[in-house]
Amino acid sequence: FRSFKKKSLNGNSLTRLLLSVSAGVTSFSELFFIKEPHDVTMMRRDAVILDCQAHGEAPIGIRWLKNTAALTESERVYLLTNGSLFISEVESRKDKSDEGFYQCLAQNKYGSILSQRARLTVANLSSFTQQPASITVMEGSAARFTCKITATPPPIITWEFNRVTLPLATERITVLPSGVLQIQGVEQADAGSYRCVATNIASRRRSSEAELTVTAAPSPRVPQRPRITAGPQNLTVAVHSTALLECMATGNPRPLISWSRADHKSIDVHKTKVLGNGNLLISDVKPQHAGIYFCRATTPGTRNYTIAAANITVLAPPSLVEWPESVTRPRAGTARFVCVAEGFPTPQITWLKNGEPVHSNGRVKMYNSKLVINQIIPEDDGIYQCQAENEQGSVLAMARLIVVMSDNRPSAPRNVRADTVSSSAILLAWERPMYNSDKVIAYSVHYMKAEGLNNEEYQIVIGNDTTRYIIDDLEAGRNYTFYIVAYMPMGASRMSDHVIQRTLEDVPLRAPELSLTSRSPSDIQVSWQPLSHKLSRGRVSGYRLSYRTSTDGAVTQLELSGHKTHHLLEGFQPDTTYLLRIAAATSVGWGEPSAWTSHRTPKASSTKVPLAPELQLESLNCTTVVLRWHLPAGSATGLQGYKLSYHEESEPVGPPTQIPPHLRQHTIGGLDPRKKYHVKLLAYSFMGEGYQADQTISTPGCVSVRDRLVPPPPPPHHVYTRSNSSSSVFLHWARPAFTGGQTVNYTVRCNPVGLQNASLVLYLQTAAQSLMVTDLDPNTNYEFAVRLHVDQLSSPWSPVVYQNTLPEAPTRAPAGVKVTLIEGETALVSWKPPDELNIAVTRYTILYASRRAWAAGEWQILQREGSITMALLENLQSGQVYLVKVSASNQMGDGPFSPAIELTVATDGHAPRAHGSAHGTAFSDGFYHLDQRSMTGIVVGVCIALTCIIICVLILACRSKTRQSSTTKSIRQAGGQTPPTAVRLANQSQAESVEVMMPMIRDQFIDAKGGTNLIINSYGPVKPTTEKKKPKRWNFFKRDSKDVKKMSSPSYSYHQGTTLLCYTETSPQHPPSSLQGLFGPPGGDSEGSHSSEGSHETGDSGRYSHDDTEATNLSLGIGSRPASLQGEESEASDETPVHEVTEKELHPHVIPMTETTLQKQEMMEPHPV
């Protein structure tokens, strides 16, 4: 039977030998959350619902925690039937505040789980923390005002000049979201008072006024070098938020402003834009946007410039990189859960069992990101959660431990003994269990350091053919504790008694790293860090310091006590190179000394140069070292920069690297592993080079893995992903180049980034080198990894690759649209994102118009970024009723508009009302309702309208017989024959509509009393038969001669007592070929877009204006108009082009013709109108 080792961090403690005992549980679905609460900001006295829905085996109980304490229900705060928490009126008083952190706890018979943490905040707008200050500037220069205010949510800040709102951006004026007003090229007209206005959903505040005084500029203006008057400031921003770096410069001529990064990386042009004359705005900030940014102001056409720098720190909420997996373990076995999270600041990992914190004890240990449970008992069965938390939020992942009970387990191994063999080895021996020893199939040896807390426990599995084992990878001079567990197919024994044994000491493995500096030209300060216990291999009893000059072979030695870490050597010659080294000793003896390290003492005249920097070195990995330093007090005067040089031991010194004076950190990369490097750093000023700091550091090894008897195969490489749709991703990978094994299979792991429930991880099996993963959520970032299986061996997971599924266009309108009049001419519209999962919104479009402009289709348009859910509507007219609606958009398309909201701008000073439009008067969010007076007015109006309709129907019915007889008589007299009567209007009400709205065909007329010479059959209109007799010509309507175009027209018969209606077309087209050509398409819903000189029309004859602040054109169809006007639009829409008509042309003159008027008009040409 072959034995082998397995370190605890590698996962399961037992191998395939014991799979029957410790088979893992890949997933469980007994209890998990469907919905969890999220951060929310609410208005005071508004209602709020915090979601919490759990799925699992019933019954499931839900409890809520507020600030980690149990929440008490009341009439105002109580649970809904689905487990969500409802607060009817949010309060923010000191004695009764609902603000805080909320979590829900779900429980069933398998255990309990805790949801993520959600913060409830009440919207507020505090007083200004910084008011704008009065300034005096010269004409032609730049002016800057600033104000600051604390508010939740962040306010919209605008500025007023002499109490008139300024535009957000012009050629000279820029308003920054941070509350800064910049005015370039100041003019005399800019003098006056300025104040800022902060607005959010909670309130609106105005700052105090500040005066701008403009003085005359000298003529001619003197050239001035560029000067940055307002440079960028260090920022700490959350991921996905917006970062603004201000840069404002003056000079003559006006300087040009450019931006760059200190690490020479390119600036993200897709997420970055410039506001005004040089302010850098980064939207949707990502971790890669962190770094130092330089603002450079340059005089055009010269090399004169000045630079300002600022650092952006990006805070990221925790996201899980590795999460615990559910396992099944026998009683007395060992379970390990691993949880790794990333974020900034680094998340803190805590463990929960059934919603309660896990505490370390003799069996349960937590170290780094792992939870280890030894000697499992039945009470350990439950649901365990890993919680990663930082100031940006928290994330949880869950896994279940199932404890398997078994009978006839063996008793514990007996008489465990430990004997020290060397400084790194201990011999362990034991006797077989007293009961069921013949059923033992393996032993596991457990050991760990005896001193300290949360030490890592190691486990070695060996066969049942021996009761002795040498553990040979221990540290020297350490106490270790050991115990043994026996295994059989049905379970494990209890652990044996613990024994403690200490390894022998040894000479130090290596000497400390030296750091050398000089405080004066005649001394050297020597310092070093104590050796780690692993390197010292015992307690250090002393140090031996040796030194000599580079030209003299005589060595001076000095022995120091083991607790010292520095020593000052004096009496040296100035400007001389000295070599120094150190050795360490334990009770066993002296270790090898370090290599010689050189240091040159300063020159005797170097009394005013900078002192040596205090240098710290740290190994990031096996090839990278980070340097950090700071100067002693008083050494930064006149500082010009630093000079850094480094070289490998026994290699020549390379050329120095220049470092700017404002930096205090530098990274050295590309080093070799397991090598010693000498690093030298000095500061220099106008007085010359300062004192030098010398230090050595050894890079660690890149690989630190225990020996394995059978190494695993390498993982697949070149993993490639591509999004195919919003629900599928295509994966492809390459098979590693190895010779062993014939049959190869792969496992693909897929899960959303930041997944909290380990049971929802998707594992897919395939024998091919590609796979299409389907049924994914849209606009979700997934991580994929691939593992290879060959000859019963599994490779490690491949490096994780990330891929976003494609998004979908919004299918719902923004929710909770609310319009509030905050003063006479300004309203605040706020909304919530569409209630859709995994839908990204990149832009919101706000349409608003008064009723008069709405009837003409003239909408004002505002657009806001997807992260903004408020907008100001300015310059509203008093006494008008405005309609407002909002839609969401992303790169895949535009979503629908919300139902229109009516806002009444009052003229009498009373509070206005906002309610739903004709599209819907009832709102689910409860913000708007019709009061009793409005409802009464609507009922009275409907009754009056019904009465008028009934009277009109009676009048039309009475006139119908007269119309029919008059029509028959007119046709017979005019044409000498009876025209076909198969085609008639459907009813008399349609005939009335034809008189006013129907688009007519050229050279035809309609007898408004019912008579016409237009004959229509199934093939279309038939032109009238003209008689040979001389036609009569009439002037039907009087018009000014300059407005009348004379045209020839065929003769028409006229009958006394009838009325003729004529028309004119500007662009004649072919006549309609069917009845649809006269009355428009069926249903009246078609849209047309026709152009004529100087106008652009849509189906609703809409003309759209430009907003003052955002000039955006938007074309709307009939569907966007209220239902009350859609009928008119459908009647007016036609297949033939129409021209833009005036109000007079929409109402043709209808003149009753008499015999006298006919005689007066007989000699005149007929003119169509």
Image (spheres, helix red, strand yellow):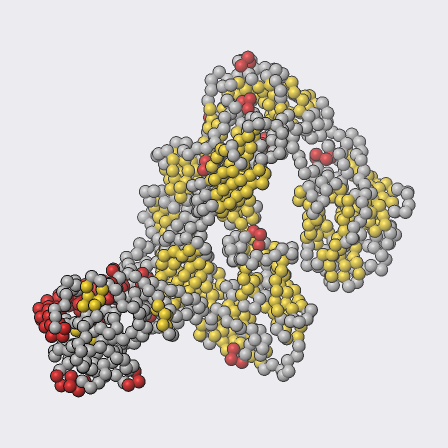
Residue placed most toward the observer, 222 or 561: 222
Q: Nearer the viewer, residue 27 or 300?
A: 300
Of residue 678 and residue 945, the one placed in the foreground of this image is 945
Instruction: Give how far across and how far down residue 770 sits, in percent.
Output: 51, 38
Tell me if residue 459 comes above or below residue 1005 in the rendering. Answer: above
Q: Is residue 967 left or right of residue 446?
A: left
| Residue drawn at (31%, 72%) of the image | 1068
- The answer to which image quadrant residue 230 occupies is bottom right
Q: Is residue 856 visible?
A: yes
Residue 433's spot in the image, x, y percent? 56, 15
The correct choice, above or below, for 391 with respect to 965 in the image is above
Residue 708 image point, x, y percent: 64, 27
Q: Is residue 638 left or right of residue 812?
A: right
Which quadrant: the N terminus?
Answer: top right
* Residue 183: quadrant of the picture: bottom right
Q: Residue at x 59, y 61 (%)?
A: 233
Q: Is residue 913 visible?
A: no
- Give me the residue at 62% from left, 29% from top: 739
- List x then y, in percent, for residue 884: 35, 63
